[in-house]
Image (cartoon, rainbow, N blue to C red):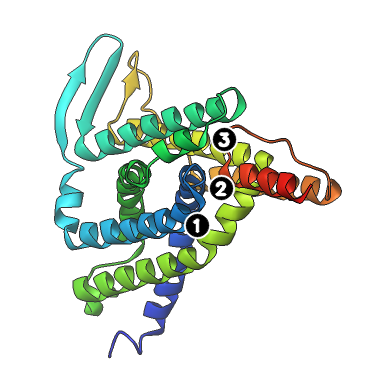
Amino acid sequence: MELLLNPDAWIALLTLTFLEIILGIDNIVFLSIVSGKLKAEDQPKARRIGLLLAMAFRIVLLFGITWVLSLQDVLFHINTDFFSAGVTGQSLIIFGGGLFLLYKSVSEIHHKLEGEEESEKGKASNSLSNAIIQIALLNLVFSFDSILTAVGLISMKDPSQGGFGYEGALAIMILSIIISIAIMMIFAGPVSKFVNEHPTIQILGLSFLILIGVMLLAEGSHLAHFKFFGGEEVHSIPKGYLYFSIFFSLFVEFLNLKMKKGKKPVQLHNSTIMDKKLEDTDVTN
């Protein structure tokens, strides 16, 4: 009750919820791309399961926050004439996630632009379970990043010292995760439909994932204190620059879509929504 009456707690909740939604944009883009390859009836299920997994991972990691913070401890050192690092569990997870995201993004761009068209049998092979495994792997990485950001933002100090206390901070973080995931569930369907109906948005989305993958590689390198040839440590990329470039690119593309409204978009390979539209057109004709 004391927490509910604390205006600072409400401000912290709103701030953290907004931040979770912003950090979840890359999650929704990845969900849209992966679920877009499934059969139409499986796509909503994949999005729901993906977002519920994201929520579950974040809440579980919050309850194991001591273990998460212990991942910042150095596991082993590497010292050579041209390279040095102090590798941590956290840096391995973040770095591995960046590599996975780069591989997945580049592979998807290749399949959409130069890959072979899939038959109905081929589309069925893009099973729901396979999509969920990919979503779960990336959610794990995004969850670590999200939780560490939340812990850095919400003070766990005793209320007498200006914080919210451990239980109060935990309640704020869990509530912000639940609210942000609920909001993303509402908009995930329309966003996925829009992304999969517009080829340029799909390619932009995959390009954003490449940027995020590079950001994760830089973040993992920074956490492991990578040094090359005895120089300065590798620095992380500020998220503000990344999200500004994403929103600016989307703004430019929305202007392009508005100017070219009514023109038939180029069809990418492996697009279930576009295939369905073409089938409907053929039936009508």
Mark 2, residue position? 243
Q: x, y percentage for residue 7?
A: 41, 84
The residue at the point 20 percent across, 50 percent down is 69
Distance from the alpha carbon under mark 3 to that under mark 2: 13 Å
**Res 66 visible:** yes
Q: Which element carries disc 1, helix, strand or loop?
A: helix
Identity of the amino acid at label 3? Ser
Query: Closer to the camera: disc 3 or disc 2?
Result: 3
Identity of the amino acid at label 1? Ile
Q: x, y percentage for residue 151?
A: 30, 59
Mark 3, residue position? 207
User: Which image quadrant is residue 8 in?
Assistant: bottom left
Residue 22 badge: 1
Query: Marks 2 and 3: in contact by CB < 8 Å?
Result: no
The residue at the point 56 percent across, 53 percent down is 192
Query: Marks 2 and 1: in contact by CB < 8 Å?
Result: yes
Query: Closer to the camera: disc 3 or disc 1?
Result: 3
Q: x, y percentage for residue 221?
A: 34, 30
Is 158 on the left or on the right of 220, as rendered? Answer: left
Residue 234 position (above or below residue 184): above
Which badge, 3 or 2, comes first in the chain's sequence?
3
Is 177 on the left or on the right of 63, as rendered? Answer: right
Q: How many marks?
A: 3
Is 8 on the left or on the right of 168, as rendered? Answer: right
**Residue closer to the observer: 240 or 96:** 96
User: Which image quadrant is residue 9 in?
Assistant: bottom left
Residue 184 position (above or below residue 113): below
